[in-house]
Amino acid sequence: MKKILAIDDNSDNLTLIRYVLQKKMPDYEILLAGSGSEGVHLAQQHLPETILLDIFMPDLSGFEVCSLLKSSDQTKSIPIILVSAYGYDPKIRIKGLNEGADAFIIKPYDAAELVALVRVMLRIKNAEDQLREQNIQLEQTIKRQLKEFSNSEERIHQIAGYANEIFWEVDQTGCFQYISPVVEDVLGFAKGDFTGRKYLWDHSHKDHRKQTKAFFLKLLKKKKKFEREKFLFSAFNGNRVWLAISGFPIFNEQNEFTGYRGASQNITERMLHEEKLSTVINTSIDGFCLIDQQGHIQEVNMAIINMTGYTEEELLQMSIFDLEASNSKRINSHYLSNKEDGHKRFESTHRQKKDNIINVEISINHLGLEKDQRYIFIRDITKEKLAEKARKKDLNRIRNYQKRLKQLNTELVNAEESERKRIAEYIHDGIGQELSIANLKLTSLGKLELLPKVKKTIGEASNLLNEAIKKTRLLSYDLSPPILFELGLLPAIRWKLDQVSDEFNLKCKVISEKERYALDNHLRILIYRILCELLANTGKHAHADKVRVELHEKKDFLYLAVSDNGKGFNYKPTANLSDYGGKGLFSIKERLDSIQGSMQIESRINKGTSVCIKVPLKQ
């Protein structure tokens, strides 16, 4: 039975996971581990189909468990779902994904969502296992076929180097009038045993003698040339010898037929090789057919018979184009490509006898054994295509899930801004007012006739209250600056630059082509918060003394550029933004992605940093 492993130091969480999964997925055994080390041991022992992993555990954290499992060849292919209440934190999610996690689900979770996500992981695992197994089988098959092909080439070269042809001449009855001495090396018989004594079909193998004699007698009547006809002969020592015989009729001056002249080539080694090659082809899991230069099928193996549903007799009456379900001229031309084109491989679709369509991978070779023959190897890849389609479908679901997470992130930002505003109003109108009243009442006591010590204490308390009132007002402005909502974006930027200038001792300059920009509250707040994040990074990390802020509008986009003359850093566009420390830049990119905005960063060591934000005005 296949297994699913859940790892959590909270037994109640494990009990809940087991209950949910056993109810919806009864065919799977649910393994439970109460610690990270126990989870690693169970994963290595049982190799589950997927793992549900808590992050914060006392002995090994979920990140450490994830890293251990993904670094092992034995367990690296097991999908891991991190289950944590901290999944809302992008920093946690990024760290989990960097350690090798495949998905997140946030506590408290919906049972249906948990089951659906587990099933997605199981489908991905199953598809990857199938692809992995097929790749192994393909690699083994290719290695085996390459080895056989290598042996084939070696044998063919040997034949070409050492083959001896027997030249001969026979009269009109087929009796030898001349035969070259090479016959002694090929068949082992003396040359004198043939002349005037033997016929073309003599010494042919006893099992083939009747057919061989019938062929030559018919040929003597037709008086036509023939080329490379294959016949099996018996040598003097009893060995089987294959000869490829070619010949042409000869006539005297009166145009009377007098016999044949020709040559016989020893092709025994090649025929033995072809028998071995035929054995390999017939036992191959891939379909095979041999076609001529017109595409007619001349030879097939059992695999293609099973693949197409046609019998061998039916296939030998067809052409390769009868199997093709595609009408593509490009694909059809591949089958009849010239010999110089060499090996070809491509994908297509074939039609089975019951008109079912299957996906196939075609490999075409010209092995050079016969003129204008093409060796077609056909592999059914329908399951792989279905698995690939399912994988893409699952990936689309994951992308949609990520898109929904970004939408939720946008809603969370909006909710955060509303909460900031509410808290700021509470601090300003509530706590701030109460502190002011308390200060008034306290200072009024100073007008009374009191001891000097008491008056001094009242004065000190009043100073403390004044300082608290200033900090309260500043805090409420930082949380939700009224100037942003009442006067607009540019005045708020100037106010923020004044604040940054005092706090970090920076010379700040703002350049804008307009005084007011027609922005809705959402965009105004987003751009202001991004600016605050960039200015905070500059003040804390850049070691700069100048900051320049530019704001302009072009077509349907608003551009915000923040540049400094600080120490800079070695920025690579392909790097993960979280690698540059903190979550500021990553958070900015996430917010921009949610509104189809973009961010461009330019920075070099000791050359300062420039960040340009592009925001669409129409949402």
Image (cartoon, rainbow, N blue to C red):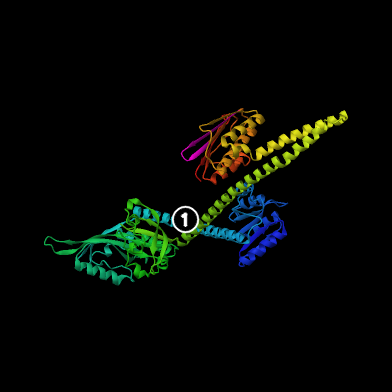
Residue toward you, 109 or 614: 614
The majority secondary structure of the magenta stretch comes to strand
Residue 89 place in picture, x, y as percent: 64, 48
Residue stretch rendered in magenta on the structure = 546-559
Front-lying residue, 231 or 389: 389
Taking 381 as reference, is 220 left or right? left
**Would you name the residue on which mark 1 appears?**
143
Q: Is residue 528 left or right of residue 352?
A: right
Q: Position of residue 287 (x, y in %)?
A: 41, 63
Can residue 187 be seen here? The reply is: no
Measured from the top left, where is residue 462 in percent x and y?
79, 33
Position of 173 with respect to 32 (left or right) is left
Residue placed farthest to the right in the image? 451
Quarter of the image where the N terminus is located: bottom right
Q: Is residue 5 visible?
A: yes
Q: Is residue 382 left or right of residue 548?
A: left
Magenta-colored stretch includes residue 552 = yes
Q: Image quadrant of residue 420? A: top right
Q: x, y percentage for residue 9? A: 71, 56
Residue depicted at x 61% and y 46%: 413
Q: Quadrant of residue 147?
A: bottom left
* Nearer to the camera, 468 or 504: 468
- Mark 1 burial class by Cα count in 10 Å: few <14, some 14-19, many 20+: few
Mark 1 residue element: helix
Q: Amino acid at mark 1?
A: Lys
**In the foreground, 485 or 535:** 485
In the rendered structure, does residue 205 fall within the stretch colored magenta? no
From this view, report whether residue 446 is shown above or below residue 79. above
